[in-house]
Each structure stands twice: as C-alpha cells, then as structure tokens.
Image (cartoon, rainbow, N blue to C red):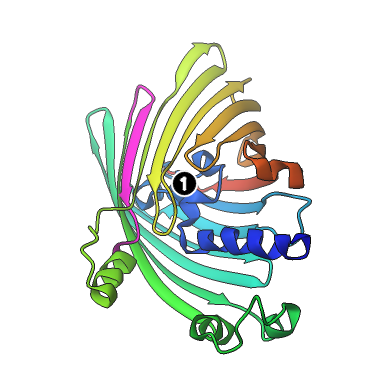
C-alpha cells in the first residue's frame, strides 16, 4: 500500500486543479483582484505581482504554483488586468491565462466597482504516465486519461462587485465558474445554478496608533469541484506598513493555520506565509510556503 500512497494522495490533490485560483493562494489580501475582478485597478496605480506557492512541502509531487499578473488603472474609472498562472501536481500540469476588466465609480465616501474575468486553461499529462504506474492503477484505454495526455482545454468566466469606504471598510462578492456551470448543465442535463460558486470578502482597517493598523478580514468561498471554505485573517501593520505580521485560519477543508510576515517599502512590497494543515496528512509533509513580490508605479491622484 505504501508504494501507491503518493499516487492516491496526488490523485486527491489533483481534484483541486479545476477549482479557481481563488482557493489556492493564501496571500490574496495583498492583491484582491486575484479573488475578485472588480478590485482590478482599485488603488489607482499600476501593479505587477509575482507569486509562488509550495503546498505540503517535503512530500514528493505535491502542488507547486507560480503566477505573474498585472492590474492597473487606465483612468479614474477603468481598470484592466492580465495574468499567467501555472500549477503542477505530480505528473499533472496546468497553464492558465486570464484577463480582467473593471469599472469603478466614486459615490461620496464609497468607491464602487464591477468587473469581469475571462480565462483559458490548459491541463496536460505526459505520455510517460503510462509507464510510471502499474496497469492495475492506470487503464491505458481510459478516455479521460487519454484526453489529459492529449491536452484538455477549457474556458471560464467570473463576475464581481467590490466596494471600499474611505473609513477603511471594504467588501466584495464574486460569482465564479459561470461558463463551466453552464456547460455542466448542458452536458449532464443538470440544474446547477450559475450562481452556485462564489467568494465573499469583507474586512476593515483600524488605525490604532501612529503608523499602526490592525486589519481583520474574512473570506468565504465555494468553487466548482471544491468544497466550501472560509478564511479568517488578522494583519497587524507597523511603521506605516514597513513591518507586517498576521495570523490566519482556513476552515472547511480539514483546517489550516497560517502566519504572515511582510513589508512595504515605497513602491515595493514583499510577503511570506507559512501554513500548517490540521489533518492527518500533515505528518507526511512540513507545511506550505507562499511568497508574493509586488511593484507599484504610476499612481494616479
């Protein structure tokens, strides 16, 4: 049984590939456009973000995620974004191309935004998969397996609303997997709601002293082919964000506890998070690591 333990674990993990990247990255609060297209260009600047995540480090073949994305304000009301995301889980590879478009409007002390996201995804398995595992585990004539070896492509879209008050409160909701839910209905004759998968994100920035901000936030999400989850995060920002620390807990998927360290120096920001899975699988790995590097330029007045 131990011989096949890595394969069955990776098979379980691979079910997460069809889920949105919103459920993968834990540092989304440093770049809200990752989970809600309406937040694109919301800070009235141009932003380039580099992100990497190693899940369940120390266990061979577990998920590795990398991304580079841009989002920026073309004007005081229009925002655009684009990104490339890659993921590998064992032999399985995914490449994801995304674009965001957003419109925002200032209403007294509240900025309101609406946005859409479109994505094209390619998922592949190498031909060598047939020789890597025993025939008792993999059926060489399996049509689904053959489809992934040839390369399986799909498209999807999401829609979001985002708002921020000048007092520091922000909230957003996004509807996910709009195209894929519609295709599920057509192919299976199902009656899935196009609004079945979503993210709801709420937070507030409390100024508790000179250069000190405490920022609690909550994210609740449910993506296609993935179970519902919730995140509770508290960030503490000192010296005008030159030092950032935080704690987070993710529930609904076995439970994960995380810590955050970061810094923001003028136009450059860097963040690191470390997560521990609370389930039995944690004994087989040394936790998950994630980093984000951000560059901000051309801020509009």
Based on the picture, tell me whether residue 48 belongs to the magenta stretch: no
Nearer to us in this view, 288 or 226? 226
Badge 1 density bin: few <14, some 14–19, many ≥20, Cα 10 Å: many
Residue 187 as seen in the image, left or right of residue 251:
left
Q: Position of residue 7 (x, y in %)?
A: 68, 65
Q: Secondary structure at mark 1?
A: loop
Q: Position of residue 297 (x, y in %)?
A: 55, 47
Nearer to us in this view, 131 or 265? 131
Q: Which residues are magenta?
A: 165-178
Nearer to us in this view, 287 or 113? 287
Can see residue 119? yes
Residue at image coords 23%, 67%: 190
Reply above or below: 67 against 22: below
Q: In terms of image quadrants, where is residue 204?
A: top left
Can see residue 285? no
Specify the farthest residue to the bottom: 141
Specify the farthest residue to the top: 209
Residue at image coords 71%, 60%: 5
Residue 286 as seen in the image, left or right of residue 68:
right
Residue at image coords 43%, 43%: 300
Reply above or below: 60 against 235: below
Q: Position of residue 8 (x, y in %)?
A: 64, 62
Query: The N terminus lies in which quarter of the figure?
Result: bottom right
Residue at image coords 54%, 58%: 69
Residue 298 as seen in the image, left or right of residue 76:
right
Residue 136 as seen in the image, left or right of residue 117:
right
Q: Circle 1 sits on which residue?
A: 45
């Amino acid at each position: 049984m131990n011989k096949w333990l890595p394969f069955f674990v990776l098979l379980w993990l691979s079910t997460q590939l069809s889920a949105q990247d919103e459920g993968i990255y834990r540092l989304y609060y440093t770049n809200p456009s990752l989970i809600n297209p309406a937040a694109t260009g919301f800070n009235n600047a141009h932003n380039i973000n580099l992100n990497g995540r190693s899940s369940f480090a120390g266990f061979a073949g577990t998920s590795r995620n990398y991304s580079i994305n841009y989002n920026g304000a073309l004007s005081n009301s229009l925002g655009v974004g684009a990104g490339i995301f890659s993921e590998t889980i064992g032999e399985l590879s995914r490449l994801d191309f995304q674009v965001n478009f957003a419109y925002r409007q200032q209403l007294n002390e509240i900025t309101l935004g609406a946005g859409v996201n479109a994505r094209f995804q390619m998922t592949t398995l190498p031909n060598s998969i047939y020789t890597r595992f025993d025939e008792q585990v993999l059926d060489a004539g399996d049509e689904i397996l053959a489809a992934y070896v040839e390369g399986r492509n799909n498209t999807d879209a999401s829609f979001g609303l985002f708002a921020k008050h000048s007092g520091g409160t922000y909230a957003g909701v996004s509807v996910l997997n709009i195209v894929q839910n519609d295709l599920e209905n057509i192919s299976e004759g199902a009656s899935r709601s196009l609004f079945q998968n979503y993210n709801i994100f709420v937070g507030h920035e409390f100024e508790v002293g000179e250069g000190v901000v405490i920022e609690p936030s909550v994210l609740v999400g449910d993506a296609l082919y993935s179970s519902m989850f919730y995140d509770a995060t508290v960030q503490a920002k000192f010296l005008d964000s030159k030092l950032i620390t935080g704690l987070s807990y993710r529930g609904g998927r076995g439970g994960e506890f995380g810590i955050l360290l970061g810094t923001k120096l003028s136009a450059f920001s860097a963040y690191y998070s470390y997560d521990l899975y609370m389930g039995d699988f944690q004994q087989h790995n040394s936790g998950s690591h994630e980093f984000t590097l951000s560059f901000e330029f051309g801020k509009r007045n």
